[in-house]
Amino acid sequence: MNLNRSSHKLALSITASIMAACGAQAYDVPLTSINTNLPPIDFHGFISQGFLKSSDYNYLGDTKAGSFQFTEMGINAAFDPFPRTHIAIQGFDYDVGDVGQYQPFLDYASAEYTFNDYVGVRAGRVRRPNGIYNSIQDIDLARTSVLLPQGVYDCRWRDFSASIDGVDIFGNVSLDKAGSLSYEVYAGFVNMTDNGGVARNIQNGLPPAPIGGFDGMDQCEAIGSQLWYNTPVNGLRVGLSGGYIENFGYKITIAPPYGPGDIQARDNIPFGMASVEYIWKSWTFQSEYFSYNVSGNQYAFDARVPISYSSTQMEAWYVGAAYRFNKKFEVGTYYTEYYGDVSQMDNSQQFQKDVALSFRYDPTDWWVLKIEGHLIHGTGLLQDNAVNPVRDQNDNAWFMLALKTTFSF
């Protein structure tokens, strides 16, 4: 694994150097060679490398010693073969601590047709709309911060939150002087990987082998919608989104006499989010509230009678602001709180409160540098008890430094 990651880091360095030397231009592939007047295929890509260093705990990797296990890369193509028709695809690869580990996957691949301003349909592997950033988490140029508020947009959970295999219906409705509405309604399936953030969270909560074992994730169904109200006030919009994930399932083993053996878990997850964003001159103000409930049963494998039932309500919120000084410099800050169980809001192992200060520098249109500091209280998002023993966790404040550079073309 160390050799594999070293090879990837070398590849990242070479790719970044090539992109810098070439000016990181986007590429169009014409189709005239196959005797067609279709428009060209438009290719883009990006590569990001980060560094994380924390004071007291390992968060998003082995960060107490400093970690370069914070890498993202993707390449995408877009094609408009006919009027009102758009085809897009993106491959993505990432490594955040023990999540991802350079296993590339299909981030999205969809075809869409827009009938008119009011109705369009998109099908395939489509991005799942939820709040301001969920569908654009991979676009580092779209934000000031290195890390989005992690209780709302956990960078380890991309395979769960970013996309679905299904259908998305979208459109815009003008309200004349009252503004406009934009909406999306989707339904489909979530396909999670065994090395994604959700799977790692489950694995890290199990007893060590051979007592505990993880046997994989199941496909689950998802439905949801998002509505944005673009107000008559220039730059101000308000959004609501929500949905329901059904039959979220996984298989684990807790060997006797410590447990019942093979276990099948089935959960249902309703969720909702409220968002507000105001862009005024060089300022951007944002705030979001996110809540979801995980409830369901655990069954002895192939049995119909549940052996346990649980229900946990989680919530997170943040407020943030950013200011753009000029084309090259931007500064931002946010404060966020996360509660892994609202019934234990005073338990520092169930909450995480974070104040962040970010600086962004754009040397060119295709190269971004960022530095960010986090003062954190609580350990509710550490998730990995193997490297952060519960007995060592306390309610003292701790610090994390985050650095990141992104090249895009």
Image (spheres, rainbow, N blue to C red):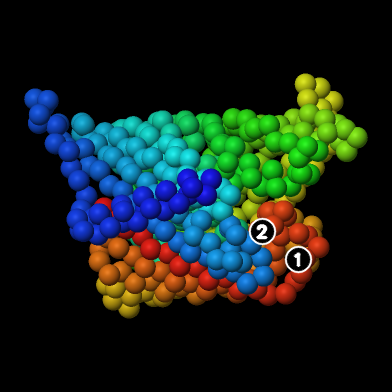
Is 164 drawn above or below residue 150 in the view shown? Answer: above
Q: Nearer the viewer, residue 286 or 16?
A: 16
Q: Which mark is residue 382?
A: 2
Amino acid on which the number 1 mark rests in the picture: Gln
Is 117 drawn above or below residue 400 in the view shown? Answer: above
Q: Which mark is residue 285?
A: none
Work out whether residue 51 can be spotted: yes
Tally of numbered tags: 2
Residue at 81% from the left image edge and 63% from the top image edge: 391
Instruction: Return the residue found at the far right.
Output: 257
Circle 1 Cα neighbour tier, 10 Å, few/some/many (<14 / 14–19 / ≥20): some
C-alpha span from label 1 to label 2: 10 Å
Residue at 25% from the left image edge and 63% from the top image edge: 365
- Residue 369 location (% of width, % of height): 37, 68
Q: Are marks 1 and 2 in contact (CB under 8 Å)?
A: yes
Residue at 31% from the left image edge and 52% from the top image edge: 15
Instruction: Return the residue found at the far bottom.
Output: 325
Asked whether, in this view, residue 302 is left or right of residue 52, the answer is: right
Residue at 48% from the left image edge and 40% from the top image edge: 103
Give the residue pinned by disc 1.
393
Work out whether residue 129 can be spotted: no
Amino acid on which the number 2 mark rests in the picture: Leu
Task: Give the image quarter of residue 282.
Answer: bottom left
Asked whether, in this view, residue 24 is left or right of residue 189, the answer is: left
- Residue 128 location (% of width, % of height): 48, 42
